[in-house]
Each structure stands twice: as structure tokens, then as C-alpha cells.
């Protein structure tokens, strides 16, 4: 997959393009339906597939909950997932006031057709764009006749009675429903960060932990609690458990992320680690003493070992 942004020179695809436009935060199963249709249509019409997305979430520019909104994917994660789906091009548009005020027809004609050689457009069930969100399906059908491109609108994808959406998945993760969130994503939610120094309490209790600092301010952190995880570190995969929370047993404050990796005891400070959240097993708790805390960690670890089929 080739990434196109404002630093790229003239974009000249060999054939015309089949395009879909959107933020694509999470790239969940609803997005998969669009991307699969995009790929199939590209093949049938002899076109190259292109995902048109933005360098930042539009709400950060429009100042709508910009301090509260957290994202499911970083830009790097989004590109990695799209590359794995066989997309030919990822076009990253700088989202600013000028772009936001662009009329829908100007966007279609000047950018998608003239610049990106669009021959087909694939959109989701509720998609609209352009100034005042005037670019709805009715206008698109009108413009498709005027400018000679096909437009395809897909139905919503639902799961467990809910239409799958990025906002719904964010709510599920914040509420601690990892199972349904992962089901809607179609993969395990993940977090990448740097291993930093902690207080060493875990090691004193017999469970050394890697304290993790997220690399991205806007990345959504799942609800506080204990999770079964897989961790990727320098190409190797490790199993373990992880706690997100304020360390209430130690009268802690703020939010901390601590992973205990099984069969692992190496110095990994300042190294990057990727955490995949497999299962949430309990809420964060405050214990009366260290013995009670240690006993509970043993139970958490046993659940994880059973999950990985390492014990009967």
C-alpha cells in the first residue's frame, strides 16, 4: 500500500480509482464491509482501491468534545491494518478549516475526480460530507450522473442488536465490555507504549511488572481493571495479565498500566511494547493488605493460564 499525503508529489494512478471516504477510526467490522466491497469493485472495474482519510479526527478541528474524544487507532495502526487488507492507496488529507468549508461538489470534482481519478465511490449507510454535510446520497447520485462515476451505498452492519460504529466501540471499552468491543472490531483491541520505571512493588510481591506509558495522548485506554493479554516485544509474543488503574491498595492516584508477563524477567526499560487485550476478568479492587492482594493476583494468573490452556 502506498501512502499519499500533502508531502507527496503529483498522484498519477495507472488506472482510475475506486474510493471510499471516512475517518475509519477502529477499522471495525462495519468498515470491513466497505473495504471488502471497495476491493471487489476495484477488481471488477479494473480500478485501483483508495481509502481517503484525514490526518486528524474532524472533531479536533471542529472543537466538538475535542478534549474528551479518544481514538481507537493511531495513524500508524490505521495504516498497518489497511495495508493488511490489500488496499492500493491510503490518501491522508489535512483536515483544516479550509477543507471543512469546501462545498461537496467541489470536493467531488476538484479532489476525488480531477486529482485522484475517481471512477467509483463506495460509502457507508449514513455517510455525508462537505460543507454542512450536504454531500448525502441524493446529491452523490446526481453528481455521479453529471461527472460519470458510479456510487455504491452499503447497509449498516449490526451485532448483538447494535449497529457497529466507532463511537459504540469507544463506549463499550470505556464501560469495560471488552468482549463485545473486540467482537465489533473483529480483532483484539491494542495499545502500544514505552516501558518505564515503576515503584517495584510487583517484583516485591513476586509478580514483576512492566509499567507502560502510552505513546499517544489521544489513544483510548480501556476501563480500569485486570485483563488477560498478549504482549509483542521485539518480535516475540508473550502471555500475561495487566492491570489498569490507580493502585487503590497503595492509595495511589492517576492511571497506571502494569503488565505481568509469564516466564519473563528481563530488563526492557525504554523499549516499545504492544499489548493486545484478550479478556477482562475483573474490576480494579482495593485490598485490606498485601497478602490479600497477592492471593488475588495468584487467582488472576491462574485464570489467565487456564485461558491459554496452560493448566487444566
Image (cartoon, grey):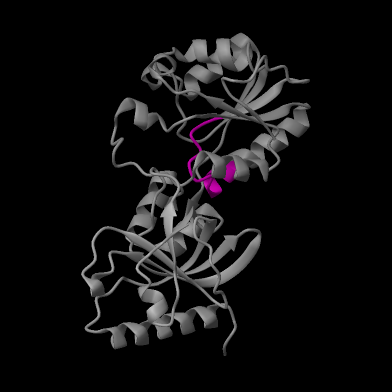
User: Which residue shows up at 41% across the image and 14% down it?
Assistant: 98
Taking the image as drawn, is residue 161 in sight? no
- Residue bounds of the magenta highlight: 21-33
Q: Quadrant of the C terminus?
A: bottom right
The question of residue 175 being in magenta is answered with no
User: Which residue shows up at 76% across the image and 27% down it?
Assistant: 45
Provide residue 215's location: percent of width, then percent of height: 45, 47
Q: Quadrant of residue 32?
A: top right
> Between 287 and 303, which is closer to the camera in this rendering?
287
User: Which residue shows up at 40% across the image and 29% down it?
Assistant: 58
Q: Is residue 215 above or below residue 146?
A: below
Provide residue 9's location: percent of width, then percent of height: 66, 16
Q: How many marks?
A: 0
From the viewer's perspective, is 51 left or right of 202? right
Q: Quadrant of residue 132?
A: top left
From the viewer's perspective, is 134 left or right of 117? left
Q: Quadrant of the N terminus?
A: top right
Q: Is residue 101 above or below residue 59?
A: above
Taking the image as drawn, is residue 158 in sight? yes
> Between 251 and 239, which is closer to the camera in this rendering?
251
Amino acid at each position: 500500500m502506498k501512502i499519499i499525503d500533502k508531502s507527496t508529489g503529483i498522484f498519477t494512478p495507472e488506472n482510475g480509482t475506486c474510493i471510499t471516504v471516512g475517518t475509519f477510526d477502529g477499522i471495525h467490522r462495519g468498515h470491513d464491509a466497505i473495504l471488502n466491497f471497495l476491493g471487489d469493485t476495484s477488481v471488477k472495474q479494473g480500478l485501483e482501491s483508495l481509502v481517503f482519510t484525514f490526518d486528524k479526527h474532524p472533531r479536533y478541528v471542529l472543537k466538538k468534545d475535542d478534549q474528551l474524544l479518544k481514538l481507537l487507532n493511531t495513524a500508524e495502526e490505521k495504516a498497518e491494518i489497511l495495508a493488511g487488507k490489500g488496499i492500493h492507496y491510503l490518501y491522508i488529507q489535512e483536515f483544516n478549516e479550509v477543507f471543512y468549508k469546501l462545498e461537496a461538489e467541489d470536493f467531488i470534482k476538484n479532489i476525488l475526480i480531477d486529482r485522484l481519478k475517481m471512477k467509483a465511490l463506495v460509502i457507508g449507510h449514513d455517510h455525508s460530507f462537505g460543507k454542512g454535510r450536504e454531500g448525502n446520497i441524493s446529491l452523490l447520485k446526481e453528481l455521479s450522473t453529471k461527472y460519470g462515476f458510479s456510487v455504491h451505498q452499503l447497509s449498516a452492519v449490526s451485532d448483538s442488536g447494535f449497529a457497529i460504529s466507532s463511537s459504540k466501540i469507544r463506549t463499550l471499552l470505556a464501560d469495560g465490555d471488552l468482549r463485545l468491543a473486540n467482537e465489533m472490531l473483529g480483532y483484539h483491541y491494542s495499545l502500544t507504549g514505552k516501558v518505564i520505571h515503576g515503584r517495584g512493588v510487583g517484583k516485591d510481591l513476586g509478580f514483576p511488572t512492566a509499567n507502560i506509558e502510552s505513546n499517544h495522548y489521544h489513544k483510548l485506554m480501556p476501563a480500569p481493571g485486570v485483563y488477560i493479554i498478549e504482549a509483542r516485544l521485539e518480535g516475540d509474543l508473550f502471555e500475561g495479565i495487566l492491570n489498569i488503574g490507580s493502585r487503590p491498595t497503595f492509595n495511589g492516584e492517576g492511571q497506571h498500566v502494569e503488565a505481568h508477563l509469564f516466564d519473563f524477567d528481563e530488563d526492557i526499560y525504554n523499549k516499545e511494547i504492544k499489548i493486545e487485550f484478550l479478556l477482562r476478568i475483573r474490576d480494579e479492587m482495593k485490598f485490606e493488605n498485601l497478602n490479600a492482594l497477592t492471593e488475588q493476583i495468584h487467582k488472576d494468573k491462574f485464570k489467565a493460564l487456564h485461558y491459554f490452556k496452560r493448566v487444566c
